[in-house]
Amino acid sequence: MSFKEKIDLTRLPAHVAVIMDGNGRWAKERGYDRIFGHQNGVVSVREVTEGAAEIGIKYLTLYAFSTENWGRPQQEVDALMELLVDTIEKETPTLNNNNIRLLAIGDIQRLPDKSAEKLKNCIETTSGNSGLSLVLALSYSARWEISNAIKNIAADVQSGKVATNEINDALISSYLTTNGIPDPDLLIRTSGEQRISNFLLWQIAYSELYFTQIHWPDFRKEAFFEAICDYQQRERRFGK
């Protein structure tokens, strides 16, 4: 029996977040440069997105590019941005055909104009779709997001729009880039690393964590379905 057949469709996580790690190591093991790994990682993005849509998951967030990634060699950053533009442009019709809506979180203003424009066009083109919401975390870091939220809350307190006694978990969540998106039920990280790497720190307070040794370019549908099965074996208590 495949892992997909074992999934209980009545107990799906509403939101799965993924730290897509291991592209560089996967490429190095095969004697190629890092961008070759990123190119093959796009296939896994397509497979996992299709798999999530097939079983009825509502939100899938992929950690595509962190604010720390801007510090990588310029050649790799440029290649990643070019890959982003090409992939978004090519995949927009597929997203529409599969009723998938694209969203983005992060400091999008830092993206090159060409990348930002293609991203904006895809978000607008798919905005009417009602199936899976695919959320790309681009130029994203949780500390940037939380710092930004605090600045905006402080400004609204100063202007009288918000009273200090109104500040609570729900209000803070409403100032985050994930406003309107449920917190992840499951966080997956590939390639053997067991850390969060500044990703959705506020939102994963009660998420189940799943770590796998599989490098991202080898993480396909069946591996994703295995992670869902593992999630369904757990008892979630939320501190109670």
Image (tube, rainbow, N blue to C red):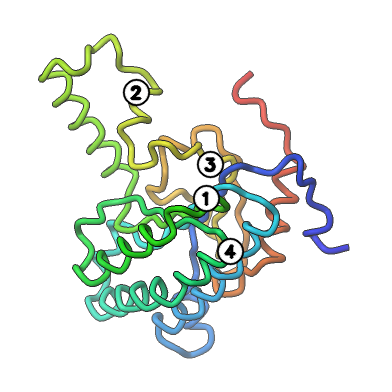
Give residue 223's quadrant in the image.
bottom right
Dividing the image into 4 quarters, which one contains the C terminus? top right
Residue named by callout 1? 17
Q: Is residue 49 above or below residue 158?
A: below
Crowding around mark 4 (Cα neighbors within 10 Å: few <14, some 14 to 19, many 20+) is some
Label 1 and label 3: CA atoms lie apart by: 6 Å
Of tags 2 and 4, which is closer to the observer? Answer: 4
| Residue appearing at x 48%, y 72% in the figure | 93
- SS at badge 2: helix
| Residue appearing at x 20%, y 56% in the figure | 109
| Residue appearing at x 70%, y 51% in the figure | 228
Dividing the image into 4 quarters, which one contains the N terminus? bottom right
Q: On the picture, is 63 further left or further right than 171?
A: right
Label 3 and label 4: CA atoms lie apart by: 22 Å
Give residue 126's quadrant in the image.
bottom left
Q: Amino acid at mark 4?
A: Asn
Dot 3 or dot 2: first in sequence order is: 2
- SS at badge 1: strand
Dot 2 or dot 4: first in sequence order is: 4
Q: Amino acid at mark 3?
A: Pro
Dot 3 or dot 4: first in sequence order is: 4
Residue named by callout 4? 98
Q: Amino acid at mark 1?
A: Ala
| Residue appearing at x 26%, y 34% in the figure | 149
Residue 171 is tagged as 2
Residue named by callout 3? 184
Give 231 or 82, whichever is nearer the viewer. Answer: 82
Of tags 2 and 1, which is closer to the observer? Answer: 2
Dot 1 or dot 3: first in sequence order is: 1
Q: Amino acid at mark 2?
A: Leu
